[in-house]
Amino acid sequence: MKLAIISDIHGNLEALQAVLAFLNGEGIKDIICLGDIVGYGADPDECINLIRETTDHIIAGNHDWGAIGLTDTSFFNPVAKAAIEWTADTVTEDSKKFLVRLPLTITRDDFLFVHGTPSSPEDWDYLFRAADALQEFKSFLQKACFIGHSHTPLMFARDLKGMTFQVTYAEQRLEDDRRYIINVGSVGQPRDMDPDAAVGIYDRERKYFTLERIPYDIKAAQEKIIKAGLPAMLAERLGAGW
Ligand code: ZN
């Protein structure tokens, strides 16, 4: 049985549809979403509706909370702020009721799922460095913690001696004597200079984790952003993946 982990859809319906079509083709129905369904992209309601139809396992991201006034958006950069205000004005009451009910973490099997960091999910901190990962490993007991938020695929391991290090992000066997923090990248706004949508796949039998990249109709998503009157930069960045 395989498990798919997706994150940071950000209102990009074209990217979400492409990822779900890929998972459907692979026969993967067990899907966990790590939040930020909305913000930046032009189809927040459509993405909420599609992800709700697809899975019950969804946690909240900072943009989901920002769109319903649950988190302070004064710290957002001006473009993100403009987009979250547009999103708050655009989404339906039904969508808002859905977003407000989302939990901050999910535990499944021997895994923890969180948008930002396991130590303080509600603070929306970023995790980029092994030194920070060292601290984060102390805050959860599971075999692995899957995260999103930075839109940057990254993988950290910790061995039995407590050594924490970054591991190459390719197909990876999750070793029995190691624990992991795995960032699955972003479906709707990748920032690792690869514009294709990212989706993490965990194969429970083989204990393998793989990151797949899925091409989608970027031009259509860009045109919708411009047409909606959202900042043009949000369309531009999709083309290059930054
Ligand atoms: Zn995000």
Image (tube, grey):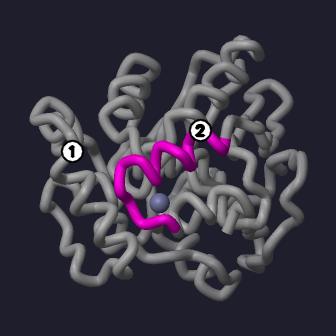
Q: Mark 2: which amino acid? A: Ala
Query: Which amino acid type is shown beneath numbered disc 1?
Result: Thr
> Which residue corresponds to the image point at 77% horizontal and 30% vertical from the top-left?
203
Q: Which mark is residue 241?
A: none
Q: Nearer the viewer, residue 206 or 35?
A: 35
- Compared with 183, 217 (above or below) is above
Residue 154 as seen in the image, left or right of residue 100: right
Tell me where residue 51 appears, x and y as whole percent: 42, 28
The picture quadrant where one finds residue 211 is: top right
Q: Are marks 2 and 1 in contact (CB under 8 Å)?
A: no
Residue at numbered disc 1: 90
Q: Secondary structure at mark 1?
A: helix
Picture disc at residue 220: 2
Q: Is residue 146 above or below residue 234?
A: above
The segment highlighted magenta reads 218-232
Measured in 3D between alpha carbons, the distance from the residue under mark 2 to the one under mark 1, in whole angstroms, is 19 Å
State the quadrant of the N terminus.
Answer: top right
> Closer to the camera, 101 or 8?
8
Q: Residues within 10 Å of mark 2 (few under 14, many from 20)?
A: some
Most frequent secondary structure within the magenta stretch: helix
Q: Could you tell me residue 147's position as x and y percent?
A: 55, 57
